[in-house]
């Protein structure tokens, strides 16, 4: 997946995975894992784990990642 993604492309990717299980506006940990593995595998090649990434993205600690929290991936992908 290209690092130069539009907000619309990112929202579409988010929606595709979030809709698979429950709330279409939130990613569960499993949904985030599938999304990262399929769309942004380079994020898992660093020293951190998916658990670390999930904790970093889940700013409010509700156990799910909203689109607003997910947008932080743009910063990671573009670095």
Image (tube, rainbow, N blue to C red):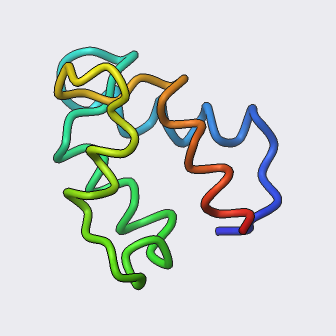
Most foreground residue, 59 or 34 = 59
* Residue 27 picture location, percent across and down: 31, 32
Q: Which of the image's four quarters has the N terminus?
A: bottom right
Work out which quarter of the rendered image holds the C terminus and state it.
Answer: bottom right
Q: Position of residue 46 (x, y in %)?
A: 42, 82
Residue 60, image x and y in percent?
A: 31, 19
Q: How many marks?
A: 0
* Residue at (66, 50) in percent of width and height: 74
Q: Looking at this view, is 52 or 15 the one in front?
A: 52
**Place of residue 62 in the rendered image (x, y in percent of width and height, measured from the top left):** 20, 19
Give me the residue at 39% from left, 40% from top. Answer: 57
Name the residue at 50% across, 78% down. Answer: 42
Task: Determine whether 47 is above or below 57 in the image.
Answer: below
Above/below status of 23 relative to 68: above
The residue lying at 35 percent from left, 68 percent from top is 37
Name the quadrant containing residue 71.
Answer: top right
Q: In the figure, is residue 25 to the left or right of 22?
A: right
Side (left or right) of 59 relative to 74: left
> Looking at the image, is 35 positioned above or below residue 14?
below
Q: Quadrant of residue 25?
A: top left
């Amino acid at each position: 997946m290209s690092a130069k993604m539009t907000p619309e492309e990112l929202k579409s990717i988010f929606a595709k995975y979030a809709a698979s299980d429950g709330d279409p506006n939130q990613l569960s940990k499993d949904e985030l894992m599938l999304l990262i593995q399929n769309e942004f595998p380079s994020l898992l090649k660093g020293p951190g784990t998916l658990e670390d990434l999930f904790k970093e993205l889940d700013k409010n600690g509700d156990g799910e990642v909203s689109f607003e929290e997910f947008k932080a991936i743009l910063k990671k992908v573009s670095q």
